[in-house]
Image: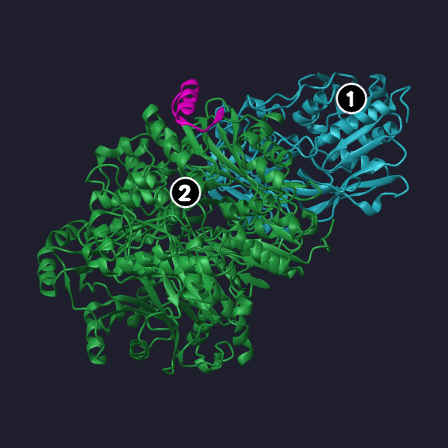
Chain colours: A cyan, B green
């Protein structure tokens, strides 16, 4: 039984059993409390630069399936779990989870006290760490953890973004003969989606809602986007700090009022910056699939999927320009707003879910509604 | 939508007696609901026929009625109390059915009572299988193909179309009673016949089988604003085919991908919306074909259920409490989460541990019952275990079951492996382990059991590790090995057995190596937020979150899983102990592993440890908490067996010294004490082999009562009428006696049995709480006998003697707290049968009859207070016997309808699962109500069938005359008929079963009998008698098997014809007691 070590910058060291790739990776150590959907977490590009602790103690049970990927490869830097299953039990599984991460070069440490680790991060805040299956000197790893850059000020979105534009046409596929997803809506809109680390299920959901999607690199200029003659512009999720993304924010600012804009997660933060707001880093972030968010327009509560370490400061937004539409009921952080005069709105959480509840799918329809209303000739 | 201010008074209907399929989880839900509503300023009127519940405690509601759960009595309560609303969803199937009945009879409308929780249409849509299927089809959800059937022929036709095996589910029966899986035409005929008979609407559903599919449940909550959350997902370890109540279940679901889980979540929420459950919790069950992911919806309960209780305990999310609040208008986002305080109840709990529930069965009580597990629930209780991993939780759960057999000492037959794996019975889990240890692969076992390979693989890892343990030794084993063993959930006792060393040696060795238990919190959020409620479970991780206080504190050891003989009554006592401690300013710490109970609610005690009740686990808690006292006398036998070992290890036990508890069980020492006190007991002796036993029996004279030492609920107790019976007993019962001798008593025939509960303090003060006269003669287990307060036929002289003996026994044993004594009176002599210096099963009943909180006072006495300190609660009494203002009858409830083929005759082995109480101004009225509540209402007219042995003929004439006088026809077998005619009574003669036809059974089946009185002959029952009793059970004809029972029935029938329907709340009954002081 080989071992692996997780070392944190504050000197805390945990040792456990090694699975996955026999590698060493560094990153910000964060925790996710979702009970299901580890594969979607592995492959969410927003986890780039992060070592992820899953609080569900049994991980790997149902293996992995190529249909459940949220991108082309795993993006987490490392995985920390209480117990990792060496076998997979699910009819859809094509690869055992350990092999899947091994192929992606991701190390796993299991059999350690993830709850103690989470409580540590909850009280101290997230911090840098190194997960190594090759180095046995814990002190060296602590030193390494201290030497990596902090997440604040880090532009990771540019790193994970696509290099070339591409078209996306795949809708949502059922995962079982019994799943009733409904036929995709007729394609009536062309959406240009900025890829800051986009999840595939966002693209599938856009198609499902009746959109043809052109995915473009994160630094595509506003002019180039407009040249594609989109009906709407989508701002994706992504990793890292939104503040260094100055050029992206400038582009977005130019698009507001020109085309309907919808942002998710990092896209929400960038829209916040574009309308003059500020962002800040949360102590330990929101990562999970059980966060209650109230839609202030309908007063209904949605159970939502989250993955973010930064947030938009609601006090920094100009109330004359922006109307707050969603609040988090757990910690009263800002979860969504819309522009008062222009067709632009965004949410901090993940309405595409994957993993997580489907309560917020309606937002994709609101986007198409906005595009319909903004089309030439549409009565306002 | 905040609180509704148009409602003021709310009626809650409980679920009645504990029966298989409906246990104390509904005491938990009703109690939570009542507490939540009262905390919010509503008046609560509560009705339940079960006096053993916490919910019927007069402090929990404004008005508490222990009355029959039938429409006429409910109407009378509604007429008196005029509630504004009826909360229908917290009283189990019984409460829900009654709500429907009251609505349909127009009673709710008549008195302007609004149904809250679930509306009548929603209930019907969910409960009526056809409407349900239509509704599901409408929203695109698949259900197994099925058809409602009213006849055998239609059933066979439909089965021919869908193929065998197929599932039969009778409509409107509890826990699937009467259902089953038919593998062929013969099976189908048998199950259909039974199912149609048991269904109140003579209807069953035949359904396509999803046998072997994976089974899941989701617990959903919805508020009036249509906010929906899933509280918990549960995956069954046993595949489809085993009733979920009989399945091992695991939370959260382990083998679903997010996409499958979200599909199920969407379906569950769509189901609630379509059915129209406006507010509250519901449980939705699904099956998934493991081969292709096809999902079907099996059923939904539009109410709080057994699984909701489990989900509440598994997550820390109080479903019933929240359901009650939603029913009165609150929205989920307006209610806060008690555990985190800062976050709302509108979220989905996430957990960082694994929960396993394992059912507990009682087939040893029902020889002849079919132990195969199928669609009808057969378990009597369950345990829940929390571990950081599935492995740890499963092994902890197995340990919590108290099978009486240590790991490694179970007997497995290699020849039976295939059969035991393929056909699910209570033995299956053990056989899975045995098969793994003996070379069967996970694939082989999966093929035979359909258990998901992930679960099997987890088990295999532990079994392989167990195999390797044998090569280690206590002194040689490194810390890492201990740690791994403990993380797998392996007990010290198992390690000790493997290494042939003492359990304490293992404990001290591993602690020396630094391997000690720590405690984590159940916090609803996987540690994302701080937890303010100390709801804890043990594990072997790195950090302990117990944070014990420095207050004065007492640990209460609970009673573990419900079983026959040890159930809710003890939970009642434990909860009261906790409340009393808190009132005295002492921190109360509860330890229990039964998820159904009120005691395992996180807000019952200051601190809750959800742990197995084993020496190891209790010691771990004591190491952490360092309590000032441990209470062992309230949880039944379970904590008592731990008392002496705990005491020896220096743990302070408060109350009666465990040595004296032990003394009362020790035949020799106790006999000596009785001699010294000059108190008679039946002649007796002990034996350790068959020859000795026969010799003792000959010396005492037959019949004799034979039993093992140290049992509760009369387990393995028989009355032997000859030597052959003694020999047979010694052959078959030895496994229960272990190294303790078998006890043999002269059996007192035709004696009256009396139960006494008393309180005693450390200064020699003794207060007798109740002298209960049994209605059945001695020989019927006290738990199976109806009894009455105050005594109805005891001579004043005998009562004085009983009081005198009780006081002297309490002093001689230095009882501090509660004591129970059983007496028998034969020919004017009072004999002591048994003394139990601890809380008895009758404590809640006596508390409710006297209006005096016995358990609460007992805890004060154990903490050093005196009886005088409680005069304000006893109406001034500090000695003598408490009085009761009316007549209170307690009657048992039996599960015989779940076990066709089992002889329902009463005997010394306890077999009732629950109890009810009837309240009246005279005995007949109280007994009548008790019988109605027990589900065997006595007829007002019709025919009484009487067949008694010669010994009872004179009594039978008396009883028959009384029935005839009330207008009943008499039917009797030849001998009895002759006696009746001889006394001038008119009666019809019917053949005995072995004589020819038409016989008594034909008459029963044909509906020609409304009441059967059939006394056992001395020797073992003949087939004939069994057939009559069995058929009476199946035809729902009350069957009375004792003459005293028959006399009581005559009284009750007279009351039924004479007295109006009357009800009294406990508060008004006991008002006088409060004003005395």
Say left or right for A262 vs B1028: right
Mark 2 neighbour class, 10 Å CA radius: few under 14, some 14 to 19, many 20 or more: many
Say which quarter of the image contains residue B558: bottom left
Mark 1 neighbour class, 10 Å CA radius: few under 14, some 14 to 19, many 20 or more: many
Residue found at x 43% / y 49%: B385
Instruction: From the top left corner, tell me how far across and down residue B515 is, in percent.
Output: 39, 54
Q: Secondary structure at mark 2?
A: helix
Respond whether the residues carrying marks 2 and 1 are from the same subunit. Answer: no
Disc 2 target residue: B391
All told, the count of numbered labels is: 2
Q: Secondary structure at mark 1?
A: strand
Q: Can the viewer see residue B775?
A: yes
Front residue of B944/B223: it is B944
Q: Can the viewer see residue B626?
A: no
Q: Nearer the viewer, mark 2 or mark 1?
A: 2
Q: Which mark is residue B825?
A: none
Say left or right for B314 vs A238: left
Residue found at x 41% / y 55%: B931
Say which quarter of the image contains residue B864: bottom left
Disc 1 target residue: A192
Q: Is residue B927 above or below residue B770?
A: above
Front residue of B443/A18: it is B443
User: Where the C terminus of chain B falls, by quadrant?
Assistant: bottom right
The magenta segment is B145-166
């Amino acid at each position: 039984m080989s071992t692996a070590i997780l070392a944190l910058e504050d000197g805390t060291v945990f040792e456990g059993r090694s699975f996955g790739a026999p590698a060493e990776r560094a990153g910000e150590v964060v925790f996710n409390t979702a009970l299901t959907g580890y594969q979607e977490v592995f492959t969410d590009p927003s986890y780039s630069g992060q070592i992820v602790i899953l609080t569900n103690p049994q991980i790997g049970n149902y293996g992995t399936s190529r249909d459940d990927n949220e991108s082309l490869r795993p993006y987490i830097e490392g995985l920390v779990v209480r117990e990792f299953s060496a076998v997979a039990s699910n009819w859809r599984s094509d690869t055992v989870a350990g092999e899947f991460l091994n192929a992606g070069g991701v190390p796993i440490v299991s059999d350690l006290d993830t709850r103690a680790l989470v409580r540590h991060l909850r009280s101290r805040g997230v911090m840098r760490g190194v997960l190594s299956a090759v180095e046995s000197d814990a002190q060296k790893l602590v030193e390494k953890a201290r030497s990596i850059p902090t997440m604040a000020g880090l532009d990771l979105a540019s790193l994970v973004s696509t290099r070339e534009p591409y078209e996306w046409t795949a809708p949502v596929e059922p995962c079982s003969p019994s799943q009733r997803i409904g036929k995709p809506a007729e394609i009536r809109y062309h959406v240009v989606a900025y890829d800051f680390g986009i999840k595939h299920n966002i693209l599938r959901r856009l198609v499902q809602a009746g959109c043809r999607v052109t995915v473009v690199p994160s630094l595509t200029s506003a002019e180039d986007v407009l040249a594609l003659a989109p009906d709407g512009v989508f701002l994706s999720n992504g990793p890292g700090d939104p503040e260094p993304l100055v050029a992206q924010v400038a582009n977005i600012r130019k698009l507001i009022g020109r085309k309907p804009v919808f942002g998710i997660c990092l896209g929400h933060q960038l829209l916040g910056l574009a309308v003059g707001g500020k962002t800040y880093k949360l102590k330990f972030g929101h990562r999970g699939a059980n966060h209650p968010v109230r839609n202030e327009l309908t007063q209904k509560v949605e159970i939502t999927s989250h993955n973010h370490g930064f947030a938009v400061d609601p006090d920094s937004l100009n109330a004359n320009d922006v109307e707050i539409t969603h609040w988090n009921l757990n910690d009263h952080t800002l979860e969504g707003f819309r522009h008062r005069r222009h067709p632009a709105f965004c949410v901090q959480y993940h309405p595409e879910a994957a993993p997580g509840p489907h309560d917020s799918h309606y937002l994709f329809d609101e986007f198409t509604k906005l595009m319909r209303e903004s089309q030439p000739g549409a009565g306002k | 939508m905040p609180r509704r201010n148009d409602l003021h008074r709310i009626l809650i209907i409980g679920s009645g007696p504990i029966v298989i399929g409906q246990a104390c989880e509904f005491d938990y839900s009703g109690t939570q609901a009542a507490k939540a509503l009262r905390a919010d300023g509503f008046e609560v009127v509560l009705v339940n026929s079960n006096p053993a519940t916490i919910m019927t405690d007069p402090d929990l509601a404004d008005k508490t009625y222990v009355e029959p759960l039938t429409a006429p009595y409910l109407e009378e309560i509604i007429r008196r109390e005029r509630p504004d609303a009826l909360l229908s969803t917290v009283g189990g199937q019984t409460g829900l059915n009654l709500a429907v009945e009251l609505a349909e009879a127009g009673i709710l409308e008549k008195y302007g009572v609004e149904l809250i929780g679930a509306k009548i249409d929603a209930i019907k849509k969910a409960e009526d299988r056809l409407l349900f299927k239509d509704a599901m089809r409408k929203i695109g959800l698949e259900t197994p193909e099925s058809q409602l059937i009213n006849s055998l022929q239609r059933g066979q036709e439909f089965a021919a179309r869908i193929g065998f095996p197929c599932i039969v589910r009778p409509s409107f029966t509890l826990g699937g009673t009467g259902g089953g899986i038919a593998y062929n035409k013969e099976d189908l005929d048998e199950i259909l016949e039974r199912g149609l008979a048991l269904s109140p609407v003579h209807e069953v559903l035949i359904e396509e089988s999803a046998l072997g599919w994976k089974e899941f449940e989701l617990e959903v909550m919805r508020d009036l604003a249509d906010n929906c959350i899933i509280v918990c997902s549960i995956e069954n370890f046993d595949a489809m085919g085993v009733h979920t109540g009989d399945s091992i279940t695991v939370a959260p679901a382990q083998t679903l991908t997010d996409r499958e889980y979200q599909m199920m979540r969407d379906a569950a929420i769509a189901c609630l919306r379509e059915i129209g459950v406006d507010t509250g919790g519901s449980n939705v069950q699904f099956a998934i074909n493991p081969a292709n992911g096809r999902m079907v919806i099996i059923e939904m309960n539009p109410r709080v259920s057994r699984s909701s209780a489990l989900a509440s305990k598994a997550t820390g999310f109080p479903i019933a409490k929240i359901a009650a609040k939603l029913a009165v208008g609150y929205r989920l986002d307006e209610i806060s989460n008690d555990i985190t305080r800062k976050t709302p109840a509108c979220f989905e709990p996430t957990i960082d541990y694994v929960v396993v529930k394992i059912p507990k069965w009682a087939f040893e009580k029902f020889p002849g019952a079919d132990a195969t597990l199928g669609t009808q629930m057969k378990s009597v209780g369950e345990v829940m275990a929390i571990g950081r991993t599935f492995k740890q939780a499963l092994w902890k759960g197995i340990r919590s079951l108290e099978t009486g057999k240590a790991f490694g000492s179970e007997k497995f037959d290699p020849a039976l492996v295939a059969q035991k794996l393929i056909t699910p019975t209570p033995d299956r889990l053990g056989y899975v382990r045995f098969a793994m240890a003996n070379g069967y692969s996970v694939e082989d076992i999966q093929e035979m059991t359909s258990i998901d390979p992930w679960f099997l693989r987890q088990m295999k890892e532990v079994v392989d590790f167990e195999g390797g343990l044998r090569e280690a030794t206590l002194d040689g084993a490194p810390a890492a090995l201990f740690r791994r063993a403990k993380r797998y959930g392996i007990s010290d006792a198992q390690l000790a057995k493997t290494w042939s060393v003492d359990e304490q040696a293992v404990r001290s060795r591993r602690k020396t190596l630094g391997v000690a238990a720590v405690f984590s919190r159940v916090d609803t959020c996987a540690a994302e937020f701080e937890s303010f409620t100390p709801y804890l479970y043990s594990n072997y991780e790195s950090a302990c979150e117990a944070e014990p206080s420095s207050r004065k504190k007492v640990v209460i050891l609970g009673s573990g899983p419900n079983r026959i003989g040890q159930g809710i009554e003890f939970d009642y006592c434990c909860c009261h102990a906790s409340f009393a401690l808190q009132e005295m300013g002492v921190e109360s710490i509860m330890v229990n592993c039964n998820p159904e109970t009120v005691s395992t609610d996180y807000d019952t005690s200051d601190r809750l440890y959800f742990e197995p009740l084993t020496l190891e686990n209790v010691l771990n808690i004591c190491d952490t908490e360092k309590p000032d006292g441990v209470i062992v006398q309230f949880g039944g036998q379970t904590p008592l067996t731990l008392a002496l070992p705990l005491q020896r290890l220096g743990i302070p036990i408060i109350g009666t010294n465990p040595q004296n508890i032990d003394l009362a069980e020790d035949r020799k020492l106790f006999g000596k004490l009785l001699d010294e006190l000059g108190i008679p007991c039946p002649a007796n002796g002990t034996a350790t082999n068959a020859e000795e036993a026969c010799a003792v029996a000959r010396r005492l004279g037959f019949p004799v009562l034979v039993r093992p030492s140290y049992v509760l609920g009369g387990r393995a107790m028989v009355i032997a009428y000859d030597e052959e019976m003694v020999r047979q007993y010694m052959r078959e019962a030895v496994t229960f006696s272990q190294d303790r001798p078998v006890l043999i008593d002269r059996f007192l025939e035709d004696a009256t049995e009396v139960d006494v509960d008393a309180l005693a303090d450390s200064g020699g003060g003794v207060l007798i709480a109740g002298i209960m006269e049994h209605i059945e003669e001695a020989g019927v287990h006290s738990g199976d006998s109806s009894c009455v307060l105050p005594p109805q036929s005891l001579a004043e002289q005998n009562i004085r003697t009983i009081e005198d003996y009780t006081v002297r026994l309490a002093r001689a044993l230095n009882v501090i707290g509660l004591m129970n004594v059983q007496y028998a009176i034969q020919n004017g002599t009072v004999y002591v049968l048994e003394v139990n210096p601890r809380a008895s099963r009758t404590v809640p009943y006596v508390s409710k009859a006297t209006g005096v909180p016995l358990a609460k006072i007992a805890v004060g006495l154990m903490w050093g207070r005196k009886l005088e300190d409680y005069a304000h609660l006893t109406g001034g009494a500090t000695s003598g016997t408490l009085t009761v203002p009316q007549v209170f009858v307690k009657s048992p409830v039996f599960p015989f309808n779940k076990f066709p083929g089992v002889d329902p005759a009463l005997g010394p082995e306890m077999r009732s699962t629950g109890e009810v109480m009837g309240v009246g101004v005279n005995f007949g009225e109280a007994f009548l109500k008790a019988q109605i509540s027990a589900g065997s209402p006595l007829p007002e007219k019709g025919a009484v069938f009487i067949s008694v042995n010669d010994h009872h003929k004179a009594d039978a004439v008396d009883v028959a005359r009384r029935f005839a006088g009330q207008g009943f026809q008499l039917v009797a077998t030849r001998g009895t008929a002759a006696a009746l005619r001889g006394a001038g009574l008119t009666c019809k003669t019917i053949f005995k079963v072995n004589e020819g036809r038409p016989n008594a059974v034909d008459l029963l089946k044909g509906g020609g009998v409304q009441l059967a009185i059939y006394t056992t002959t001395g020797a073992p029952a003949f087939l004939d008698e069994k057939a009559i009793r069995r058929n009476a059970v199946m035809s729902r004809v009350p069957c009375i098997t004792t003459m005293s029972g028959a006399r009581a029935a005559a009284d009750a029938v007279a009351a039924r014809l004479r007295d109006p329907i009357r009800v009294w709340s406990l508060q008004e009954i006991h008002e006088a007691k409060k004003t005395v002081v």
